[in-house]
Structures are given as C-alpha cells and as structure tokens.
Image (cartoon, rainbow, N blue to C red):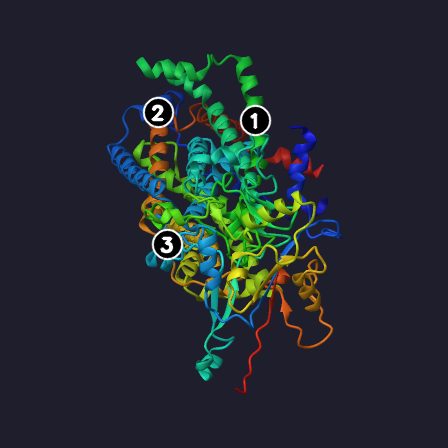
Amino acid sequence: MSHSVPSRPQMDVQVERKFVPKQKDLGADVTWAKINKDVLKSLEKPRPVFWVIFFSALALFSFGVYCEVYQYQNGMGVSDLNNPQVWGLYIATFIFWIGMGHSGTLLSALLHIIHADWRKPIYRYSEAMTTFTLLTAALFVLVHMGRLWQFYYVVAYPNERWTWPNFTSPLVWDATAIGTYLTSSLLFLYMGMIPDLAICRDNARGARRALYRFLSMGWQGTDRQWANFKVAYMTMACFLMPLAVSVHSIVSTDFAVSQNPGWHVTSFPPYFVLGALYSGCSGIITLFIVLRYVFRFEAYMTQPILNKLIKMTFAIAMVWTYLDLIEYATTWYGSDEVAKADLVYRATGDYALQFWGMIFCAMVMPFTLLIRFVRTNYTTLLIISLILNVGMWLERFQIITPTFAKSHYPWLWTAGWFPSWVQWGIVAGSFGWFTMLFMLYCKIFPSVSMYEVKEMVHEQNMEEKAHATQTEVHEPGLLPEMEGGQA
Amino acid sequence: MSLSNLIQNWNSFRTRRPYEGQYEDAPYKWAMVIDLDSCIGCNACTVACYAENNLPVVGKERFGKGQAMHWIRIERYWGADEAKATEFPERGAEYLPMLCQQCEAAPCEPVCPVGATHHSPDGLNTQVYNRCVGSRYCSANCPYKVRYFNWWNYPDRAWPNPLELQLNPDVTVRSKGVMEKCTFCMQRLRAGMDKAKTEGRILADGEVLTACAQACPTSAITFGNWADKKSKVARMWKNQQVDLAKNSQEKSEEGIRGYRILEDLNTYPSVVYLERLRNLEA
C-alpha cells in the first residue's frame, strides 16, 4: 500500500469537499415548538387567497354538477360523443386523474422505504392528493357510463341471481384495482396522520376537538403505540408500492388488451406508470408552491427539498420520454400497417396540433428545469409545472381521440370531431372538485407531517452535533483514518 | 346456484372460439352471404330493419352528429383510388351493406365488464339490454363499428302518437344508455325454432329469414342455417371456399369471390361477402 503515499494531497482535497456543509433541508431556526405552532396555525388562518381558490373551485364544481345533471337527464348524446368517438374526454381525463394519484404514493411509500428523509415535509399533502385524485377519477368512471344508476353491476358483489361481472374485462380489473388502491391509500393517509391528529386534539376547541379526538383513536404517544405504529406504517408502505404500480398497469390494459390500432402495444403498462408518475410529480410541484404560499409553509417547503423534487421529476420525465419514443419506434418498425398509418395520422392529421402540443409540453419543457432561474423562481416553476401537466393531459387525449377517428374500418374515418360544452364543463368541474376537496383537507387536517418533520429536525441536529465533534477531533488532517489505511 | 355453475359462467367468456367440431352436432348456426355484385344500394334492407327491430329515426341533426341507429347500413365507396372515381363517375359508387358480423371470436364479448354481450349456442353474438351499463367498451373494441349506443332516450321522439302502434311487439324498445346491434332478427329465429321444436324437427332452409334478406329486391342477401350442410348458405360458403375457423382463406382457383371483412384480426365473422365484379371496358 506504499503507493498511496504520493496520492495523499489528492485525498486531502476529497476530504475537504466532503465537509463543505450542504444546504440543509430545513433552516436552523425550525424547532419543535415552532413546528407545532406553524402547522396548527395553518388550520386556523390561511392567507385570504385560500378563500379565493376555494370558492372558484366550488363554482367550477357546481358548473360541472350542472353539466352532469343535464347529461343524466337527457342522455349521453349531449356530450356529442358518437359512433367511432365513444369515449372522448371522459376517459382521457379519467386516465389523467388516475395518473396524478401515483406520485403521492411514490413520495410517501417508496421514499419512506428507502429512508429518503427530504420527503417528510411534503409527503402528507402528496398522499392527500393521491386520495382526492382517485376520488376524482372514480367520478369519471360514473360520468361516462350510459346507465350510471346501474354502476354496481361492474362490482363483484354477491346477489340473489348469482350474476357476476365478466372477469375477463379490463374494466372489471379497473374497478377492482382502483377500489383497492383508493381504500389502501385512504387508510395509509389516515394512519400516517394519527400522531398529528393527537396534537391537533390537544390544541383544539369545540367541535374540532371532538372530531380530532374521534379520529386520533386515543393516541397518547407511548412507546408501545409508537413501536406498533412504525411497524404498521412500514407494512402499509410495502403493500402500497406494488399496488400503485399495478393500478396504472391495469388502466393501460384497457387499451393494450383491445385491438385498436395504436393501442395494441405491449409497452403500454410501464409507459402508463411512468406517465402517471410524471404528471403526479409535476402536480406535487404545483401544490408545493400553492401550499407554501397559502398556508405560510415557507420554513418547511424549502428550496433544497424543491430541488430534490425537481430532480426526481426530471429523471421521471426522461424515462417517460424514452418509453414514449419506444412506443412510436415499435409501431413504426412493426408489421402492423394500420397501426403505422394511425401513428402517421396522429402526427400529421386532424389532431396534429394536440400531438405536437403534447411533444412540446411534456418532452421539451422539462428541459427548462435545467435552468437554475426556473428551478428557483416560484412563479416560473408554477407555470412550468402546469404546462407539464397540460402536456400529459394532451397525451391522454391523443391516445384516445385520433385512434377512434381512424381505426380499422374506413367508413367511419371521421375528421374534426370536437367535444361539446357538456364534456368540457364536466372536465372543468372535476378540477374544481379536486381543488375544493384538497383545499378543504388542508384547512381541516395538518398538511405537513408534524411528527416526521420533528424527526427530521432531530436528525439534523444530531448530525450537526456529530459533525461538530468530528471536526474537533479529526480535523488535523484526518490522520487516524488514513493511518489506519496505511497500516 | 352452485359454484360449478358459477365457474361455468366464467368459463363461457374464456372459451376460445371457433374450436374444432363446434357445430358438428349443433342443430343451428346462423350465417349469411352478401353478394356485392347484386347489391344496388337501394337501402330496402335498412328500411326493413328499421321496421322490424323498432329502430328509431333520429333526425337529420343527430344523424349528422354520428348518432344514428342503423343496424344495417349501406356504405358507399368511390373506388380504391380517387382517379378511378373521377375517371368513370357515371359508374357511381360501390355499395357495401354492413351489419353485425356475428363474429365467432367477437372482440366485443370479452371486454364487456358486466357480460351483457355473449355468445349463444347457435352462433349469435347477443346483447342483453337489461344488463348493459353503457361503458361502450364493446363499441370501442369492435373493428367494424356496428354497435349502436342509445345516446338519447330515442323513444321520446321517434314514434309520436299514434306511430307507437307500428312498433313490433316482439322486440324491446331500448331506452337511453344501452348498447344495441343487429341480432340477425333473433325474434324471428326464436319463434321459428320454438315452432320447429314443438313439431319435433329442425327448421327447413328458407323457413325463417331476416328482415333484410326478405326485403332485398335482388336477393343479394342469403341467410340460413350454416350447421345444416344442405342449406343454401352452407353450400355457398363451401363453394366460395370460406372456412369458418380460418383467418385467411386459400382459394383453389382465380375468380372465387367470397371473402370476410377484416378476417386477419381473428374475429371469424359469420358473414361472407362476394366481391363485386366490374367491367372496366364498359
């Protein structure tokens, strides 16, 4: 090992770099008492803009309800759906919302399993986003049904006639997968909230106190409770992660299992899952910026955390881009002439604008995240994250509409189909419904996890202390370690 | 109901059709031959179908929106390439009557979430209106796009009093939100088969016809029992060298006109079309 002696100066440089203090995820002024105070304050008095957002969302939602009632009473015809265009915006938006629901689980479950601590201040609202996007997606399943009053036929329930759903149909897999995912993520969200609900209970008055008391289920914070809680939470996280992957894979089989040109692609499941994570991550960035401002979470939703979130989003965007290009390549070099014609039609036909819009918004725009100014400026970032999601919505649109417009049978090749105001109204209403629920949630429940941020602060302090002592003892050239190496 | 019954129900959706000897012992398998050379595009079949099956007339506006309800439709084609159409405009369009192909391996069947569409023992692809929830997946997956959805509550407007008296009492009037399609005039088949059963025989060839076959002035549509090897339709299939269980047909000589539409998608349709002949010199 004598050759290591000449390299000694180089190693010094490395060691020095290692101890350049990184920007901490949380500021030094964050204490346990401050966390409680700040988060509890978010339940009391948000900025006035909260009410603006809430009531605009409520208005949008009311309009959506009006459209749905109109469609319910008159029939699906009011949506201008027709023979080849049987699904339209409803299924496109359904996939969009299901997709949004995947990143919450990624943040809360996967990053929990691999101990990525930076997730702690932001996972709670992401998990809530998952739950509410799933609720929104479930609405679209009902909205697009011709006879929604008989939706329960799709669910496998025992009945006196022993009639069952058709288990070979991807729609039944859908209903089962989404039902399971919704239940589990709701449970996961609730379970993670219990210690925080106890804090709320101890600080609330009146009706709220009763609510939190009921929901916190007698949490006292004893050792035994914490031990059980940790085990249960980790178990749920491990259960939820494969579930999340399976749900969007199953949604993709709605298309991959059918035989329409452009849908019959084996790479659809990973492509859909990545697309879901992608749109979900940009949704989380949007909500990050909104919550940070509305509920004054500046101390918890910090630049370093946002930066990590953006890195993750960028990586996912690149994988999604790769899979999208793969899909085109397999079709292009494949033997199915109809699918190839369909691909060309998508890029050059009546829906070329949507296609290239999708390419621009979802494939080109992520590269702006490489610019430091975009990453650090909240306004531009808000706009970029919204553009990414517009791109992902267009992606879902151009999976469905051009395929129906030019499928196998030439007599039904139709050009220029456009959804009616009822469809647009219901789609807008779904955004209102989601925002309304989400904002209500953040007003009623702690949207930053208090106990986990406290853990984070504690660990940060421990780390600092360790560094301090390490620096004191080992700073003179870090000799002990190197001598050990040489011996 | 027992568990075995239940499993049998599920399996009926998983049966791979067509299978070896599927109709060897079966009394009935309904099939059709449409001779495009005889078709003059008069739409009599469509009108007959509207009358027989209580199809609503949807009006110009909704027709233009693509919400029409014609179980059999006459499609017009102006030649494979544009040049041909402009070169001989006096020859007019080529017609193709399109109806549900009653596929043996129907793409609509496995995807229905509630099992509202399924295969009957006599080879028909049936639709159970009561069970349909209107997810329209069957229509999305049908390559021929011959499934029609009740976008509106058509009976409200289609038969103003006293026109409701013209409705066929043997056929359900469909309400909004369900899918429907050509049934090969199942009500006629059912009545005929029941009558024959009481008399202890099977239906004779030509005893029961679909409304479209009955109305066709040029007899372009031949309908019959394919399982009966002596029936006209079975003989035509044989002469045209179309095998029900194959997804591409080999012809022994040139000039045999029988083919099935989009056969390579493995749908195994029950309708054979006879290619149209054109005298390009005329």
Comparing A49 with B142, the one in front is: B142
Q: In this view, does B111 lie above or below B241?
A: above
Q: State the separation of the CA atoms marked 3 and 1.
A: 38 Å
In what element is the residue under mark 3? loop
Camera-near label (3 vs 1) is 3
Q: For mark 2, name the chain.
A: A
From what the image shows, is residue A233 above or below residue B264?
above
> Residue A484 lies in what quarter of the image?
top right
User: For residue A54, what is the image quadrant?
Assistant: top left
Tell me the amino acid under the disc marked 2: Ile
Return the residue at label 2.
Answer: A444
Front residue of A182/B131: it is B131
Residue A152, can we see it?
yes
Q: Mark 1 points at which residue?
A: A160
**Mark 2 vs mark 1: in front:** 1
At 43% from the left and 56% from the top, the residue drawn is: A358
The answer to whether A204 appears left or right of A95 in the picture is left
Label 1 secondary element:
loop
Give me the C-alpha separation between circle 2 and circle 1.
Answer: 42 Å
Q: Distance between the residues labelled 2 and 3?
A: 51 Å
What's the residue type where badge 3 is placed?
Answer: Val
* Mark before the other along the chain sequence, 2 or 1: 1
Q: Is mark 2 on a helix, strand or loop?
A: helix
Q: Which amino acid does label 1 sit on?
A: Glu
Judge if badges 2 and 3 mark residues of a common chain: no
Label 3 sits on residue: B58
Residue A171: which quarter of the image? top right
Of the 4 image quadrants, the one containing the N terminus of chain B is top right
Q: Are marks 3 and 1 in contact (CB under 8 Å)?
A: no
Specify the subunit that label 3 lies on: B
